[in-house]
Amino acid sequence: LGWGCMQSGMGRMREAIGWTVGGWLLVLLPLVLLFSALSLALSTFAASYKEGQAYLTPVMAIGPLPAMAAALPGVELTPPLALVPVLGASLLMKALLAQSAGALEVVLVTASSLAYAAVGVRWVAALYQREEVLWAHALTDRRESGDVGEEDGDMPSHHAELSFVPRFQEPAH
């Protein structure tokens, strides 16, 4: 009788751990997407590695603060807090671990995290659709070499080809 009860308890524990890990993945993937999009968008404006680090350091310093707030005593997952980007996810993971998370909180945190991630990805997509972002390094390199003056805003038409795009020529007859 004792062994059967212990196996039954272990089965429930495995099921609870499975739900907890699955819930964590459901919550963490949109946050990873959000921070990846934010990092890519900010690094787009950097002209050098050093400048990129200067742009990303505040994100890496401020980003974990809401997660730390989840560790404060008395801070529990509520519907309004579920909508705060990192705080809601941290509180949900804490509630999943304590097995006290409800379906409403899971849906609110996941939906809001997906919405924030979608906004971040959309921002990056909008940045990379702008010609000045795509040509920024090529124009900067050409200005440094003296090929283009500062007053030239656009690339001249004879330099409009990307060097890595193969040119297809007619075969010689």
Image (cartoon, grey):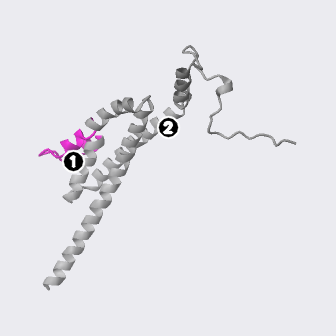
Residue at the spot of label 1: 77
* Residue 116, x across and y down, in percent: 38, 41
Foreground residue among 164 and 35 = 164
Quadrant for the C terminus in the image: top right
Residue for point 54% across, 33% down: 129
Res. 147 mark: none
Residue for point 43% across, 42% down: 118
Taking 101 as reference, is 37 left or right? right
Task: Give the residue at the far top of this rendering.
Answer: 151
Residue for point 40% across, 33% down: 49
Quadrant for the N terminus in the image: bottom left
Label 2, residues with CA under 10 Å away: few <14, some 14-19, many ≥20: few
Name the residue type under label 2. Ala
Rendered position, 124 above or below 18: above
Q: Does dot 1 land on a helix, a strand or a loop?
A: loop
Taking 166 as reference, is 134 left or right? left
Q: Does dot 2 land on a helix, a strand or a loop?
A: helix
* Residue 74, x across and y down, in percent: 12, 45
The span from disc 1 to disc 2 (Cα, nearest Å) is 33 Å
Foreground residue among 42 and 157 = 157
* Residue 43, x across and y down, in percent: 41, 34
Task: Give the residue at the far left of this rendering.
Answer: 73
Taking 142 as reference, is 64 left or right? left
Residue 76 shown in magenta: yes
Foreground residue among 27 and 157 = 157
Residue at the spot of label 2: 125
Residue 128 shown in magenta: no
* Residue 124, x across and y down, in percent: 46, 36
Q: Name which quarter of the figure residue 40 lies in.
A: top left
- Residue stretch rendered in magenta on the structure: 62-84
Residue for point 32% across, 51% down: 27
Q: Name which quarter of the figure residue 162 lies in.
A: top right
